[in-house]
Image: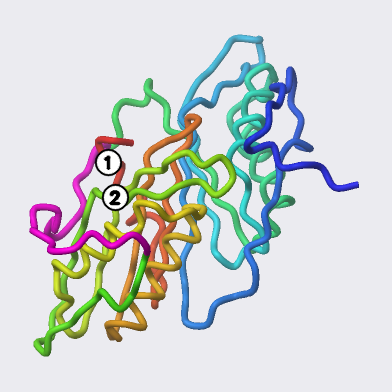
């Protein structure tokens, strides 16, 4: 009998380490021409050291879109809550345990896990602005009620540029709760009309979809409507349940280390 997804249900928090609470969601088949990864940060990680003393850090998790599954975010929170009452001899043991459990659930070719702790001092660029120019100050003439790639327009001149917006809003398809994000669009090709891009992103304000799905739809719509020579779309979602999710989709291999530099003020 398959266990039920914990999202949207009242679920007791595990009192001890329990990897069985991790819940996989199938990605579906591979998408031709799409590269990318999902970068997660869990801000509520705690565990016990070898002497039973509590430790705390931010967990950073990266895995590729080549994984068979994604991990459901509430199940990850429950899993980490159980770890908070579990002793590990040293940090290496903690990271190896988390990596092994996630590899089993994700069915991924690789999973990267790392820790960021306050006592190590603030990492460089801990709060870092997105590159390029913001399009949020532009006036847009219409406020569409659903995503429509036909909104997007291009001009004949060629450009290589980075554009970003902090106005993406979508809804969780299970709970109906709003999710907020900043979007970075990096491309080379015909110039994308900025007002049409903002109008297109605004049209997601009533859309229901997981963050990964929303990022993929934005990437595919821009790709089809604008035909860029190269394209990358990164969505930096604000945290919910102590976790922020940052999907990156691109037409070329992009470094997770580059995206990990951007931890925005709202995150």
Q: Which residue is mark 1?
A: 264
Q: Please, what secondary structure does the residue beneath circle 1 have?
A: loop
Foreground of the two, 142 or 150: 142
Q: Say if mark 1 contacts mark 2, CB within 8 Å.
A: yes
Magenta stretch in the rendered image: 125-146
256 and 215: which one is in front? 215
| Residue displayed at 33% across by 75% down | 149
- Counting the numbered discs, the total is 2
Front-most of residues 150 and 33 = 150
Q: Is residue 94 magenta?
A: no
Question: Alpha-carbon neighbours of circle 1 within 10 Å: few (<14), some, or many (≥20)?
Answer: some
Q: Main secondary structure of the magenta part?
A: loop
In this orientation, which residue lies closer to the viewer: 165 or 234?
A: 165
The residue mark sitting in front, 1 or 2, is 2
Query: Dot 2, crowdedness within 10 Å: few (<14), some or many (≥20)?
Result: many
Q: CA distance from mark 1 to mark 2?
A: 9 Å
**Hey, which quadrant is residue 198 in on the image?**
bottom left
Who comes first in sequence, dot 1 or dot 2?
2
Query: Residue 244 falls in which quadrant of the image?
Result: top left
Mark 2: which secondary structure?
strand
In the rendered image of this protein, does residue 158 appear above or below residue 131?
Answer: below
Residue 236, x across and y down, in percent: 35, 49
Residue at horizontal 39%, vertical 62%?
255
Residue drawn at 39 percent across, 52 percent down: 206
| Residue 133, above or below 81 | below
Which residue is label 2 attached to? 182
């Amino acid at each position: 009998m398959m266990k039920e997804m914990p999202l949207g249900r009242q679920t007791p928090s595990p009192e001890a380490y329990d990897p069985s609470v991790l819940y996989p969601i199938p990605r579906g088949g591979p998408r031709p021409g799409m590269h990318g990864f999902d970068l997660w940060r869990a801000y509520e990680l705690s565990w016990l050291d070898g002497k039973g003393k509590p430790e705390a850090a931010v967990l950073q998790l990266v895995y590729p879109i080549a994984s068979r599954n994604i991990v459901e975010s509430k199940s990850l929170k429950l899993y980490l809550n159980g770890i908070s009452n579990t002793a590990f001899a040293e940090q290496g043991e903690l990271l190896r345990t988390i990596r092994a459990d996630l590899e089993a659930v994700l069915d991924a070719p690789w999973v990267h896990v790392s820790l960021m702790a306050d006592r190590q001092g603030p990492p460089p660029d801990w709060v870092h602005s997105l590159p390029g120019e913001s399009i949020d100050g532009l006036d847009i003439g219409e406020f569409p009620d659903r995503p429509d790639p036909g909104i997007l327009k291009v001009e004949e001149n060629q450009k290589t540029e980075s554009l970003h917006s902090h106005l993406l809003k979508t809804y969780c398809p299970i709970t109906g709760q709003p999710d907020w994000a900043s979007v970075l669009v990096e491309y080379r090709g015909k110039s994308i009309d900025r007002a049409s891009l903002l109008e297109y992103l605004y049209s997601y304000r009533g859309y229901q979809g997981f963050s990964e799905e929303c990022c993929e739809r934005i990437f595919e719509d821009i790709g089809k409507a604008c035909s860029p020579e190269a394209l990358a779309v990164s969505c930096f979602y604000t945290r919910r349940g102590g976790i922020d999710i940052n999907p990156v989709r691109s037409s070329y291999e992009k470094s997770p280390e580059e995206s990990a530099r951007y931890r925005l003020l709202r995150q």
